[in-house]
Amino acid sequence: MGVQASKLIQITVPHKKQLPLLAYIQKNTIGQIVEKIENIPLDKKTLAHQQELLEKLDIINRALDIYKQYHPHNKSILGSILDTRFPITEKIFQHYDDEQDTIIEKATAICEKIEQKDDLIRTQELLQDTIAKSEPLKDIELDIFKPYSYIRFLPFLIDESRAPYLIEQLEKSLSPIVLESVKKMNTDYVYILAVPKEQAKKAMNIVQNQATPIQFPTEVSGSFYDIYHTSQQEYKINIKTLATLEKDIAKSPLKIKDLQILSDVLTSHLQLISYLHAFTLEEESMASIELWVNPYHIPTIVKDVAALSRNAQVIELESSLEDSPVIMKNAPIIRHFETVTKIMGYPQAGNIDPTPFIALFFTLMFGLALSEAGYALILLILTGLALIQPRLKAGIRDIFAVVFIASVSTLIVGALFGSWFGITPDTLDYASASPHMKLLFDIGLIPFLQNLQVLNPMDNVITLMGFTIVLGIIHLLFGLVLNIIQAFHKESVWDAGIDSLLWIGTLVFGILLLAINAGLLGAGLQLILDPLLYIYIAYIIVMIYILGREMKSIPAKFAKGAYDVFFGVVGYLSDILSYTRLVALGLATGIIAGVIGTLANLAGSGIVEKGGAWVVLGYILMIIIFVAGNIFNIALNVLGTYINVGRLHFVEFFSKFFQSGGKPLKVITRSQEYSILKEF
């Protein structure tokens, strides 16, 4: 029932056994390493090994990116709730560790093909640009420029309305020049300007201000004709080469599973090297590391470490409960409810784990708040099918398991209340029933459900509210008792438990007086009601004084105590009345389900009465409305029930004893991004 505190141990081994020790800790997930502020620097050999691993991991990640590009994975709803990691054994892990060089070699070949492909794509883009620019110039006869021995060609594109102005400016600013119009493209003209090389820069400045220069990459050379045809020929060759590369990449024998598992293997080795910084030098040849472990595992750790090295040593270190990571240990069926507890954080070490009590009260309250047997059957089927799926994510599995268990309670409560998809069996009569209801009578289903029904919630609202108030009082008293037990274990009953003890007395004594006054406990006890009332008043006065014990003066003690009692009474009344929401939620679920059934019946029965083919159409419409409406009602009320029942625990119950702030024990493990180690 208590939250177990982990133990701090120190393991000392020879320097050469540091990595084997870390591998043992990681493989067997035995503890949480304590990081050190002052780290031991890594030696050159280890640094070189780390760099080698990083380079291999970079190759694998690049190959993974390539595979994700060529084999895109479409996300689905199932993908968000299923664990898509590959289950592997220790033997498989070692296989990939041994074969990493082979896989790296194949991954490198893929990466090289991709680099070649990327280079070709960039070249194709360059060639396309060159072809587009040289196409208007390819038929130019360069003989027209023969008078100039040393010239630079500057082709450009200009709108016909601006061409005369630019030509005039070029002729005034440059000499000698040759300017020819070679092609018209829509409203633009393609010109080629030939100038002496020493005037090329000045010519380019003028052209850039008025027109769009046609510039070729430095990689191309030759005449415009040669540039155009050579680029076209190279472009066609590259298309074939790219197609071949695409096929080679798509048909690579290397599987994405191999890359992902090897990624985890390499990451695991890198993690081991990073943990080397946590060691402390003890002697010239010895180093120690501290880690938090489960106390029950210490004998096994001592034995395994001794087998690792004769000089190894394991000692327990002193630690406080506040610093100790916590371990929550519950039975398998109760463990699923830890997901509810963790919403408020982990309990502190040495405190009470509320999970077993949540499993009991949450299940009961969920059944009361939903109280719809038909919906419970649907939830049992859906969550049951999900729970038999072995690859369901752990967190999702816990939520589904909680709903599954709570649905059993809902089925029982719903059957006792006679709520089946909004149909209340005790209100049905064979004579006035619709044809499909008469069928249910004939096969004996309705009579069976009528025998199961104990009461109709709509006729017993006050009774149910009284029951939930009693349940709330029990729930709150249970929380106060847990606080006293918790204080007793901490040896601080007076400081931490006396207030809870006083409030238990106040609530129990007060309820007892109300029961006697109402005659619920017999007429005889009413004769001593007045003396009991005086005793209760005296008890309250003493309680006021004790609650104000932290104040120095007596008047201050009574003032502080009276303040706490007044607002405490208001708070407890508010808390107790909060539990009546369970009745409201249950009634709302049944009423909405009944309304949906009525709407479906009204919409379909009118069509069914027409007879013939209309009967089929009427029942189809009836089914559509019934199914759609109830799906909406299930989603709405299951969510509302989960939230409100959780609130009764977090606000009313936990406030009486729960102290969050615990830190979970985070044992180091191998990298599990793509794979998870399992024993088959």
Image (cartoon, rainbow, N blue to C red):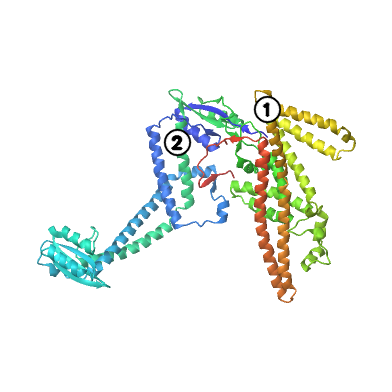
Identify residue type, mark 2: Ser
Q: Nearer the viewer, residue 370 or 117?
A: 370
Quadrant containing the N terminus in the rendered view: top right
Residue at horizontal 23 percent and vertical 64 percent from the top: 211
Residue at horizontal 45 percent and vertical 39 percent from the top: 270
Q: Residues within 10 Å of mark 1 (few under 14, many from 20)?
A: many
Seen as rendered, the residue at the extreme right is 524
Instruction: Tell how many labels.
Output: 2
Q: CA distance from mark 2 to mark 1?
A: 54 Å
State whether residue 401 appears in this view: no
- Of tags 2 and 1, which is closer to the observer? 1
Identify residue type, mark 1: Gly
Q: Quickly name the residue at label 2.
A: 274
Residue at horizontal 63 percent and vertical 52 percent from the top: 386
Residue 212, picture quadrant: bottom left
Q: Nearer the viewer, residue 463 or 374?
A: 463
Residue 219 point in image, percent of width and height: 24, 58
Residue 527 point in image, percent of width and height: 89, 34
State whether residue 663 appears in this view: yes
Compared across the picture, whether 449 is left or right of 256 comes to right
Residue 433, picture quadrant: bottom right
Q: Quickly name the residue at label 1.
A: 548
Give SS at disc 1.
loop
Give SS at disc 2.
helix
Q: Residues within 10 Å of mark 2 (few under 14, many from 20)?
A: few
Residue 603, picture quadrant: bottom right
Quadrant containing the C terminus in the rendered view: top right
